[in-house]
Image (tube, grey):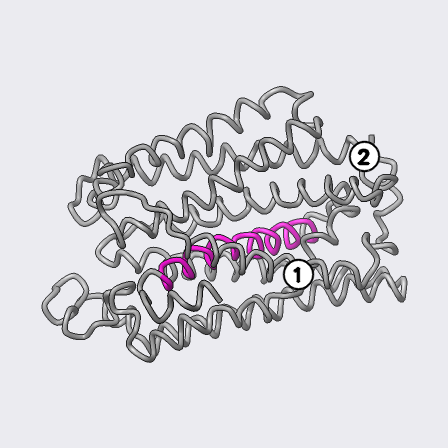
Amino acid sequence: MLSLSTLFTDSDAFFFSWITSFSFLSSFFLGSLFFVLIQHITRSKWSVTVRRIPESFIANFWKWGLFFLPIIIAMASGYLTHVYHWTDAKYVVDDPILSGKVPFLNEPFFIARQVIYFMFWSYIGWKLHKTSVEMDKTGDWGLQTLLRKVSAPGLFIGGFIIAFAAFDWLMSIDAHWFSTMFGVYYFAMSFQVSLAAMALIVFWLHGKGLLKNVVNKAHYNDIGYLLFGFTVFYAYIAFCQYLLIYYANIPEETLFFYHRMEGNWEYLTYSLLIFRFVVPFLLLLSKPAKASKSTLKLASWIIIVMHFIEISWIIKPVQSHHGFELAWVDLTVLIGLSCIMLGLFVNTFRKNDMIPSNDPHLEECLHKH
């Protein structure tokens, strides 16, 4: 109710907050989807006992997509002209850069793309979860082949779709700016933060006395290695994007970073370097740290918090060039959508076995050391 009150008093602030939180939380769904796809394609054995966690996220894509409807409705009603400037016809006419992007950045095509994205994600997520649960009930190991057949094109097409979704949701807010690496940048962030979330959920379940006999220190170690690897991969992509823009020195590109070095945005920019990469990198660098519950918890929480700050860092300077201001609507929207996301996850997770109980690789996974 607090968030909705802002919709009527300051709609721009509300929708900036909504897009920020939606993009942040969508990362958990998208990263989970790619995790499951990769596990099936590679016939991974180590991840069987933790795979039901990301599967429970992706089974709810079609429900999560409903929370993008406020953006579509507001856009169709003309309320997003200060958020997505390209939706303002008068503004676009006088802007040669935006005029050149009209074939892609127009409202009907934007809305159509969102429908395609969520239809694809919803089908793939539903199919992977449904088939995995069906294998629990029937014991039909032949369904493994179906999972791989769905995952192979899912990974290929999904790679393109997450890139275009990143362009639409985030990059088009600052429509003068462009970066061909931005889609990979958002993917790297999403995969990294989904691994952090999976680690925290495993530890939470252990605290409740669940999964203690099926997820052990060896599994922590594997999650830690992946989290460390994608922390490095994220930093590599983020730095490459910055480096290419720096030496090309094209005004439309460099202004993105220029605005993020104004006011207190500068402190957030450097904090991302330190806390999104350097601190998790150092925490997870040693081999024992990757299997340490306390170290993984700390690194995971830092990554999740900094991920929200980074999404805000991408979006909010368009709203306020001169400095970061955390409004109460940012927190209420974040808390509200987070509770919905966790509710969807818990509701799905508790309905089925907490591990794929008839997976052919389960026995090997259980005895992993």
The quarter of the picture where residue 103 lies is: bottom left
> At 18% across and 75% down in the image, what residue appears?
89
Q: Which residues are magenta?
A: 14-40
Q: Residue 83: where, in percent of width, then height?
A: 29, 63
Q: Nearer the viewer, residue 154 or 26?
A: 26
Alpha-carbon neighbours of circle 1 within 10 Å: few (<14), some, or many (≥20)? Answer: few
Alpha-carbon neighbours of circle 2 within 10 Å: few (<14), some, or many (≥20)? Answer: some
State which tag comes first along the sequence, 1 or 2: 2
The quarter of the picture where residue 30 lies is: bottom right
Three-letter code for the amino acid on which mark 2 is drawn: Asn
Residue 206's disc is none
Give the number of the mark in front: 1 or 2. 1
Q: Secondary structure at mark 2?
A: loop
| Residue position marked by numbered label 1 in the rendering | 343
Q: Secondary structure at mark 1?
A: helix
> At 27% across and 54% down in the image, what residue appears?
319
Residue 212, relative to residue 82: is it above or below? above
The quarter of the picture where residue 47 lies is: top right
Q: Is residue 92 left or right of residue 296?
A: left
Cα separation between marks 1 and 2: 26 Å
Residue 244, relative to residue 7: is it above or below? above
Decide whether residue 62 is among the magenta residues. no
Residue 284, relative to residue 156: is it above or below? above
Q: Is residue 147 left or right of residue 264?
A: right
Three-letter code for the amino acid on which mark 1 is drawn: Gly
**Figure quadrant of the C terminus:** top right
Q: Main secondary structure of the magenta part?
A: helix
Decide whether residue 32 is among the magenta residues. yes
| Residue position marked by numbered label 2 in the rendering | 216
Q: How many marks?
A: 2
Q: Residue 331: where, in percent of width, then height?
A: 46, 52
